[in-house]
Amino acid sequence: MSDTGPSTVLVTGAGSGLGEAMAGEFAARGWMVIVTDREAARARAVAEAIIRSGGQAMDLELDVTDPEAFKAAAGRIGERFGYLDVLVNNAGVAAAGSVEDTPLDDWSWVMDINLMGVVRGCRAFLPLLRASRRGHIINVASYAGLAGAPDIAAYGVSKAAVVALSESLRVELKPSNIQVSVLCPAFVKTNLLETFRSTDPSHRKRVTRWMENSGVSARDVARRVIAAVEKPRFLLLTHTNTRWFWRLKRFFPELYFRTLVRMTTRRGGDQKQKRSKPE
């Protein structure tokens, strides 16, 4: 994308899962990929794999809760390239539980990573994105940020905030010719459950099952991101069923609400029935 050097992309949380898939897809297309992760060994392993495959990569340790780490990363990229073409704010964590049951510590943990990590990333790298003259920010939210679903309170709110942040950025950055996209995938098989927090053990089993049966891979989602960079688009929905649910919510909000209530009631009934069965 840049006229002065290789096209550069930085992906946070790229040491595994969806971030790793996105790093690989960019690298396969000739991009210089800056692989970042809070675990330096993971970032290094992904960068080395890209290089062994003939791609270009560098690795950086980056904890998205640490403003000084962002400052250091921006300094290194500025010294080496002087610009950044694409920023993918991907690092995130998941939690389940109702508004009432989710501990306040979990609310703070989720918000600090999922929302403030994105805010810190945008603030730190905007000067480099402006320097490319054709920058693009991809903020990874979730369909949970659009769904208004129960029992994922802190996670859903954090991702809804990322959608709102992206909408604001899209307007604010228009004069700078910086594109903004918000990625809202549903369940994809990744290692997101490594750090998962929940008030109910059944949540983990349920999410695991949904991930296993998703039908959409991390690589599929990564390719959707590439397509949005090549032909800019703001809202990226990656699962067919979420596209239909999003239309239902937009145009028939009360019907959507009743549908959620029915789904939640049925799921709750199924769980009670399972617990009542004799061993």
Image (cartoon, rainbow, N blue to C red):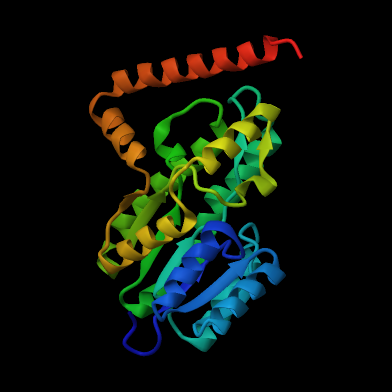
Rendered residue at 74%/10% (across/down): 278
Residue 270 x, y percent position in the rendering: 56, 16
| Displayed quadrant of residue 63 | bottom right
| Relative horizontal placement of residue 252, taking residue 147 as reference (left or right) | left
**Image quadrant for the C terminus?**
top right
Q: Relative to 26, is 243 above or below?
A: above
Q: Relative to 217, is 145 above or below?
A: above
Rendered residue at 50%/69% (across/down): 23
| Relative horizontal placement of residue 119, taking residue 71 as reference (left or right) | left
| Displayed quadrant of residue 110 | top right
Rendered residue at 54%/42% (across/down): 211
| Relative horizontal placement of residue 3, taking residue 84 as reference (left or right) | left
Q: Relative to 106, is 12 above or below?
A: below
Rendered residue at 62%/52% (across/down): 191
Q: Is residue 7 visible?
A: yes
Q: Relative to 132, is 196 above or below?
A: above
